[in-house]
Amino acid sequence: LGREVMGIVQSGSVSWQLGRQRGISL
């Protein structure tokens, strides 16, 4: 379960960084 959570957190952080670079703030 921990590994799955870490994977989700990493993917979420990546998408957040991409959105931030594009100027999209949620």
Image (cartoon, helix red, strand yellow):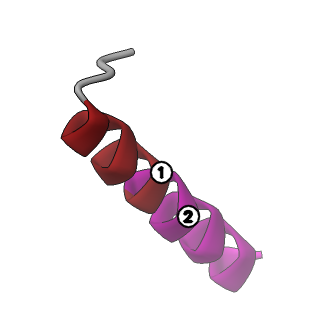
User: Mark 2 touching mark 1, by CB under 8 A?
Assistant: yes
- Range of residues picked out in magenta: 1-13
The residue at the point 78 percent across, 75 percent down is 1
**Residue at which label 2 appears:** 11
Vertical relation: 26 (above or below) 17: above
Q: Nearer the viewer, residue 11 or 18?
A: 18
Q: Which mark is residue 1?
A: none
Left or right: residue 3 compared with residue 26: right
Picture quarter with the C terminus: top left
Left or right: residue 8 compared with residue 24: right
The residue at the point 65 percent across, 77 percent down is 2
Vertical relation: 3 (above or below) 22: below
Q: Mark 2 packing: few (<14 Cα in 10 Å), some, or many (20+)?
A: few
The total of numbered circles placed on residues is 2
Quadrant of residue 7 in the image?
bottom right
The residue at the point 37 percent across, 37 percent down is 19
Query: Quick check: is 3 in the magenta stretch?
Result: yes
Quadrant of residue 5 in the image?
bottom right
Query: Quick check: is 25 in the magenta stretch?
Result: no
Estimate the x, y position of residue 3 in percent, counting from the top left: 66, 84
CA distance separating discs 2 and 1: 6 Å
Q: Residue furthest front?
A: 22
* Residue type, numbered disc 2: Ser
Q: Mark 1 packing: few (<14 Cα in 10 Å), some, or many (20+)?
A: few
* Residue type, numbered disc 1: Ser
Estimate the x, y position of residue 13 in percent, counting from the top left: 39, 55
Q: Secondary structure at mark 2?
A: helix
Estimate the x, y position of residue 8 in percent, counting from the top left: 63, 62
**Residue at which label 1 appears:** 15
Q: Nearer the viewer, mark 2 or mark 1?
A: 1
